């Protein structure tokens, strides 16, 4: 018999998730043989400047974190973390777990930024899908004298054993593919073509508009290594796991119960390359109500107000994008921040390149600066102009006009991410040349 109640009951049955799927059991360790690396040869994170093994948690293949995440293989490493592909035994999916070094300030900043983003209300803004968000987080503890634990102990931040000596913050994310930097290595001339550069820019600027307008957050560390390609191809991840089980990469016994593994790249066909996603919030700053101070940004992407000690705001991200797209499109740096006999970082040398390209900074901008050398240094006039070498005619003029909207001395004169998304050059697409 038809009734509103019966219809509602049937609809509820259709959308009911049913009983939850039980957790998968951990897989037994692989018995495949592997090559061992000479203990005296530094590899992976050991090659980093100021490497200290006590700052890195000794992850083991097959280890299970929090009775949930089983380590499948190593994806990479950095100054503040090692990154691992894991099987989520509860969620029945693959995830990446970033095991951070202990007591690192960027780790605390990244967790704060990611939790801030997760607390934001749902929105239709198109930028949120282009930001790598946090799926889960936990803390591992380890006492070096005891060797690696048989099963990792996990704790929640805020408990008595929250991050401190021998505590390691872990961040769980969706797996991603290569960075834009790695992608360029596969391209002719190590450059993005015009259409690919536009696609990357549109996604990055959309993400930035969300960060600046909705999240009130400044990234401060945008570079090619922090823009990753999304991946929605489960067979690629399963193939990675199978390769590591049947043909494991060489590893090194570093002593003290510590093994250093070689990283394995995720490999897939180009048709599975996803959209660019902005990642790594280890240098992010929350809040736009007041300006920030301090040194930020990679050397070659550093905005003039940061170099000159002027308080800065979200427009530092806009400057970085302007310089970054030049690097990706032209295959060379717009500015060179190094100079002198030893070719070390030199702020005045960096500023000299800015003056040569942009002309001298406005007087009202200089009045806010703190460097004592400014009065003498900025007597010179700029002579060079932007000189793009790939495009021609109107395309070239539009591209240079687009870059000039971002690469300006005064942050207040730089376009916002939202304004840049409406730029004529960015919205002109032409068929690819075969």
Image: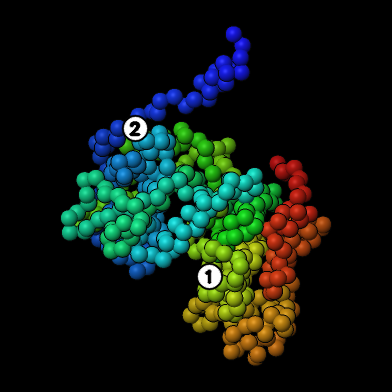
Q: Secondary structure at mark 1?
A: loop
Q: How many marks?
A: 2
Q: Is residue 323 above or below residue 375?
A: above
Q: Quadrant of the C terminus?
A: top right
Of all residues shown, which one is farthest toward the right?
394
- Residue 202 on image: x %, y %: 67, 51
Q: Residue at x 64, y 57 (%)?
A: 213
The residue wearing badge 1 is 296
Q: Tell me how far mark 1 sits from mark 2, CA to CA.
A: 43 Å
- Residue 106 on image: x %, y %: 44, 63
Residue 323 lies in what quarter of the image? bottom right
Q: Earlier in the sequence, mark 1 or mark 2?
A: 2
Residue toward you, 404 or 422: 422
Q: Is residue 338 above or below residue 263?
A: below
- Residue 89 on image: x %, y %: 35, 36
Q: Is residue 256 shown to the viewer in this render? A: yes
Q: Residue at x 31, y 56 (%)?
A: 159
The residue wearing badge 2 is 23
Q: Count neighbours of disc 2 (C-alpha within 10 A) and say few if under 14, some if 14 to 19, many if 20 or more.
A: few
- Mark closer to the observer (1, 2): 2
Q: Residue at x 28, y 58 (%)?
A: 161
Q: Count neighbours of disc 1 (C-alpha within 10 A) and say few if under 14, some if 14 to 19, many if 20 or more.
A: some
Q: Is residue 302 left or right of residue 99?
A: right
Where residue 207 is drawn, which disc sits there? none
Q: Quadrant of the N terminus?
A: top right
Residue 322 lies in what quarter of the image? bottom right
Of all residues shown, which one is farthest toward the top?
1
For the residues bearing labels 1 and 2, Cβ distance under 8 angstroms: no
- Residue 296 on image: x %, y %: 53, 70
Q: Is residue 100 above or below residue 125?
A: below
Q: Secondary structure at mark 2?
A: loop
Residue toward you, 13 or 425: 13
């Amino acid at each position: 018999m038809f009734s509103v109640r019966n219809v509602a009951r049937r609809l509820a049955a259709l959308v009911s998730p049913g009983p939850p799927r039980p957790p998968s059991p951990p897989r037994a360790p692989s018995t495949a043989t592997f090559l061992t690396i000479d203990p005296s040869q530094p590899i992976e994170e050991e090659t980093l400047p100021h490497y200290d093994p006590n700052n890195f948690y000794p992850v083991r293949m097959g280890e299970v974190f929090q009775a949930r995440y089983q380590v499948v293989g190593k994806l990479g490493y950095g100054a503040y973390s090692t990154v691992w592909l894991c099987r989520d035994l509860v969620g029945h999916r693959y995830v990446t777990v970033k095991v951070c070094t202990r007591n690192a300030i960027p780790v605390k900043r990244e967790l704060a930024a990611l939790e801030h983003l997760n607390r934001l209300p749902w929105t239709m803004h198109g930028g949120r899908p282009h930001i790598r968000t946090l799926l889960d987080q936990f803390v591992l503890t380890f006492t070096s004298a005891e060797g690696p634990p048989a099963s990792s102990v996990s704790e929640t931040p805020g408990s008595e054993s929250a991050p401190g000596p021998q505590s390691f913050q872990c961040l769980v994310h969706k797996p991603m593919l290569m960075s834009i930097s790695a992608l360029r290595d596969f391209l002719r001339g190590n450059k993005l073509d015009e259409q690919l550069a536009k696609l990357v820019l549109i996604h990055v600027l959309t993400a930035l508009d969300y960060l600046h307008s909705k999240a009130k957050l400044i990234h401060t560390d945008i570079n090619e290594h922090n823009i990753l390609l999304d991946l929605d191809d489960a067979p690629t991840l399963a193939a990675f796991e199978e390769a590591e089980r049947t043909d494991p990469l060489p590893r090194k016994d570093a002593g003290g119960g510590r093994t250093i593994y070689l990283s394995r790249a995720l490999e897939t066909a180009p048709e599975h390359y996803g959209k660019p996603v902005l990642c790594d919030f280890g240098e992010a700053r929350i809040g736009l109500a007041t300006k920030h101070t301090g040194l930020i940004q990679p050397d070659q992407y550093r905005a003039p107000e940061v170099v000159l000690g002027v308080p800065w705001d979200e427009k530092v991200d806009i400057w970085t994008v302007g310089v970054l797209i030049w690097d990706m499109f032209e295959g060379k740096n717009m500015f060179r921040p190094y100079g002198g006999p030893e070719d070390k970082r030199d702020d005045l040398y960096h500023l000299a390149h800015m003056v040569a390209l942009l002309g001298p900074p406005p007087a009202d901008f200089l009045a806010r600066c703190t460097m004592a050398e400014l009065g003498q240094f900025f007597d010179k006039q700029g002579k060079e102009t932007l000189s793009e070498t790939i495009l021609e005619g109107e395309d070239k003029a539009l591209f240079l006009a687009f870059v000039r909207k971002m690469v300006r001395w005064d942050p207040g004169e730089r376009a916002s991410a939202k304004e840049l998304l409406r730029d004529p050059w960015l919205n002109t697409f032409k068929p690819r040349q075969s």
